[in-house]
Image (cartoon, rainbow, N blue to C red):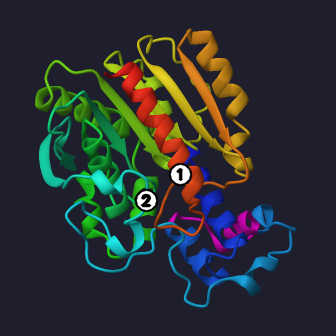
């Protein structure tokens, strides 16, 4: 498996071990990634909390998706109001609008939210389910705080996230995309922001898979990024940030997220070696995806505190 497919497979197994869905659903999702039954069973056993796959008994009977349960009708900011009305930044969030723009290999899709008087601009990178309503709201919330934002759909070349009725298939499709294409598409998103918000500094924020993509964008040596905020994102192997000298990095980790936290020392070392301004925040007593208000691991108080830190960081380094 590629580095990213391995990450997705482990995430599926951990979500199963935490009781988010049953063994049959976990095996189905791993199968969509191309794992054989033997390989899938091995991954589940390795990631089980006690090595015996005992979490099946506590799994939800409906085998629902782990991080993106949806309900109600999307509101103007592009989310389900019954789930996110009290989430940090939602009270001032502005509406997002679907846009298309030129990419290196064709037309890219995204959701854009324009700040009334932009202080800067931000590229928002989604989790491994693609461009969901939740991620659209991040762009809307940031725009409400003064940062015009573009939430890019990294499944654009596959027709867009909306063409996948099954979130697990969207995840599997992401697993088949070469990393170089992700980087090229994200750079196209930055170029689009530069056109839409001319003369303003540009930041980038990403969650889970998107947090890993923030690290990859920094490792690509992009010189247009003034501030970067990866949320619990896996660090690419051998990451070198020497080419991204202008980026000020606020890295957010979840205290209970042992899998992603294992690469934190390497991230710290790479940031130091590159001489980047940085701050590492490890939020205690929360797990992976604690910021996602549509997921079962959401922690409102921690999310609100960290969101305030993000805005402070952007205020300091974007304007």
Query: What secondary structure prevails in the magenta region?
Result: helix
Q: Residue at x 58, y 80 (%)?
A: 25
**Residue 35 counted in the magenta span:** yes
**Label 1 SS:** helix
Query: In this picture, is 270 found above or below 230?
Result: above
Left or right of residue 162, residue 22 in this image: right
Q: Quick check: is 175 in the magenta stretch?
A: no
Query: Could you tell me if the residues under marks 2 and 1 are in contact, i.e. CB atoms within 8 Å?
Result: yes
The residue lying toward the viewer, choosing from 91 and 13, is 91
| Residue 50, quarter of the rendered image | bottom right
Front residue of 48/203: it is 203
> Mark 1 highlights which residue?
303
Residue pointed to by mark 2: 87
Callout 2: SS: loop
Q: Is residue 99 visible?
A: yes
Q: Residue at x 12, y 48 (%)?
A: 100
Bounds of the magenta segment: 33-44
Q: Position of residue 29 (x, y in %)?
A: 54, 72
């Amino acid at each position: 498996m590629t580095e990213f497919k391995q990450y997705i497979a482990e995430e599926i197994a951990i979500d199963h071990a935490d009781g988010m869905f049953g063994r049959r659903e976990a095996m189905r999702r791993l199968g969509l990634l191309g794992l054989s039954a033997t390989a899938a069973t091995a991954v589940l056993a390795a990631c089980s909390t006690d090595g015996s796959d005992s979490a099946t008994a506590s799994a939800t009977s409906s085998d629902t998706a782990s991080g993106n349960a949806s309900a109600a009708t999307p509101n103007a900011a592009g989310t389900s109001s019954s789930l996110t009305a009290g989430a940090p930044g939602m009270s001032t969030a502005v509406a997002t609008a679907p846009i298309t723009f030129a990419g290196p290999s064709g037309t890219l899709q995204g959701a854009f939210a324009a700040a009334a008087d932009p202080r800067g601009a931000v590229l928002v990178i989604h989790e491994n389910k693609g461009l969901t309503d939740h991620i659209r709201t991040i762009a809307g919330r940031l725009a409400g705080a003064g940062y015009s934002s573009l939430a890019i759909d990294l499944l654009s070349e596959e027709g867009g996230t909306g063409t996948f009725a099954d979130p697990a298939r969207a995840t599997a499709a992401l697993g088949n995309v070469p990393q170089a294409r992700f980087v090229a598409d994200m750079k196209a998103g930055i170029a689009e922001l530069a056109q839409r918000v001319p003369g303003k500094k540009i930041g980038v924020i990403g969650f889970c898979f998107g947090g890993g993509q923030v690290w990859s964008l920094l490792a690509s040596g992009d010189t247009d990024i003034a501030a970067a905020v990866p949320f619990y994102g896996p660090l690419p192997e051998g990451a070198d940030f020497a080419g991204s000298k202008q980026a000020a990095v606020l890295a957010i980790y979840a205290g209970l997220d042992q899998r992603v936290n294992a690469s934190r020392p390497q991230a710290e070392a790479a940031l130091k070696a590159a001489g980047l301004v940085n701050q590492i925040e490890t939020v205690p007593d929360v797990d992976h995806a604690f910021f996602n208000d549509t997921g079962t691991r959401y922690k409102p108080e921690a999310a609100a505190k960290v969101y305030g830190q993000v805005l402070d960081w952007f205020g300091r380094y974007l304007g």
